[in-house]
Structures are given as structure tokens and as C-alpha cells.
Amino acid sequence: MSLPTPRPHVRGQIDVRTELEPYVARHLDRHLATAREWFPHTYIPWSEARDFDGPLNGSPWRPDDCPLPDAVRDALVIILLTEDNLPSYHHDVQSRVGREGAWIAWLHRWTAEEARHADALRAYLHARRAVDPVRLERDRMQHVSAGHRSEQPTLPHGLAYVTVQEMATRQAHRNTGRACGDPLGEQLMSRIATDENLHMLFYRDLCADGLDLTPDLFTQAFADVICDFTMPGHGIPGFHTRVTRMAAAGIYDPATHRDQVLHPLLRSLRLMDRTGLGPEGEQALDRIGRHLEQLNTQVERFRQRSNSFRTQPLT
């Protein structure tokens, strides 16, 4: 496909959605050629499952049914309930990109791939009796009933956000799998993380195209997103308590966000090395730099608190 030549952005003279559509088509073709078919049901230990109490007169869930660490349970619940809100995410993206062309073709494919993550995770958690199924369903009803509404003001902001979010999700999934102590759980989380990595590559490379097309606009979008980033599942019941336990366990903490998400992403986009920006773009780079300095301070404080907690004598 012959792609249009990127040109400098002049405010009010470019339709980002239209200009990026050929790149969306190219990245979708690459994604379809790269993505590997997989089947959620093959990762579920069906033979180990037991009936729950209720119409089947099985046994009620007990906290000691599954030996997963509490922080891993927290991570799996957050991951699953975040995935459960997929209808809201789909609607939000569609409202920005329309119902035709390469954008909607990508959105449908992305939605189909994301939907199987929730199917697999819920089946795994139930078969392993890893979490309280009654509380899980009540939390799902509460979270999905509230829906999700993006706070990103423009399409470049939305693309910058999903790039950071998919990168963060990939790392959270990988780290959760490594921490769970269950080989099957680790395989499942690794398989899901592979999907998330391909999604991240799609959005990251599309943002790279956007940075070439309209550098100031996308640099500002990344600055806004990076400096005020929150995961889409922040409305999940008990979210802050759960993520605190996840951080303490090393599943996802400030150092993870800095070293495994922001630094690799900024390097791959060469964002901090951009030249030829206007005043707004330069100010955006300065904001990102100051945020990284603040994040370094947060990482050091978190490490000091963690070390202090570990060395406190038991009483």
C-alpha cells in the first residue's frame, strides 16, 4: 500500500482520523498476519473443577480452596473485571472512529480478541476456585453497570492512552502469571499477554505515524496521558486496596510502571529526542521530563517503605 507522505501539522488543517486511516489498514494487515489462533477452553482445568452450592448442591467456596497468593487473586480480579467492561470500551472507540473503513475493521478484531480474555479468566478462576464467585459476580454487576467513559479529549489522546494502557496491561498480566505459582495460570496469563502485546504494537506504531504526521499534537497528547495516567479499571470495587497489595507483592508498582512501561515506550517512539517541535510540543516534552523525575522520587520512596516494612521486627 502506498501511504501518504507525513506533513507538518497546522492546527485546524488536518483530520487525524482520515489521515491515519491508511496506516490503520497497514497495521491491521500486519496484525492479522502475526496473530496466532488460540482457544481459551484448552487452558482451563475442567477435570479439577467442582460444583458450587446452589441448584447443583455442590460445596460453597472457601478461602483455602486454592493456594493462590492474595495479591495474585487481587490482580486476577482486577484484570477480569477490567476486561468485562469491553462493551463500554468498544462504544467509546466507535464514537471516535465511525462505523466504516479500516478503523472499524480493527475495532471489531480487537474486540473479538479482548472478549476471549474474560471468558478464559472467569473459567480459570471458577475451575480453580481461586476467588469467591458470589463476590466476583456482585463486583462485576456493579462495575459493568457503572460503565466506562473515556476522559481523553481527542483521538490522539485516546491513541496515546491505549498505547500506554496496553503496555501496562501486558506487564501486569506477565507479572501476575509469574507470581501465581500455578504453571497453568502462568501459561494462561502469558497467552493473554501475547494478545495485549500485539495490541500495544498496533497502537504504538500508529502513534509513531501520528507523531510523524502531526508531531506537536501527539507529543502533547502523550504528555497529558503520561502525567495523569490511571488504568481503566480504577472504578472496580476495592481497586485501591487491591493495587496496593499488588504493588507490595511486586506485581505492578511504581518501578514496574517506570522501567517496564514508560521507559521502553518512550525509547521506541524516540519521543524525548524529537526535534522540530513548536512551542507547545517542547513544553509537552518538558512536562514529560519533569514527570519522570517525580516518578523516580516515587520509586525511591516506595522502595524505602518496602524495605522498612520487611526489616521491622515481629512483635
Image: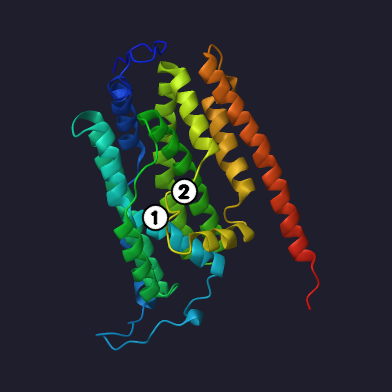
| Amino acid, disc 2 | Met
Q: Residues within 10 Å of mark 1 (few under 14, many from 20)?
A: many
- Position of residue 230 relative to residue 135, above or below, is above
User: Of residues 234 and 83, which is closer to you in this image?
Assistant: 234
Q: Quadrant of the N terminus?
A: top left
Could you tell me which residue is drawn at 20 percent across and 29 percent down? 101
User: Of residues 218 and 124, which is closer to you in this image?
Assistant: 218
> Residue 5: where, in percent of width, then height?
36, 11
Taking 93 as reference, is 228 left or right? right
User: Of residues 72 and 241, which is closer to you in this image?
Assistant: 241
Q: Quadrant of the C terminus?
A: bottom right
Q: Residues within 10 Å of mark 2 (few under 14, many from 20)?
A: some
User: Of residues 121 and 98, which is closer to you in this image?
Assistant: 98
Could you tell me which residue is drawn at 62 percent across and 56 percent down? 250
| Amino acid, disc 1 | Thr
> Residue 247: where, in percent of width, then height?
60, 57
Secondary element at image label 1 = helix
- Position of residue 227 relative to residue 300, above or below, is above
Could you tell me which residue is drawn at 50 percent across and 33 percent down? 224
Secondary element at image label 2 = loop
2 and 1 marks in contact (CB < 8 Å): yes
Q: Which residue is mark 2?
A: 231
Q: Which residue is mark 1?
A: 82
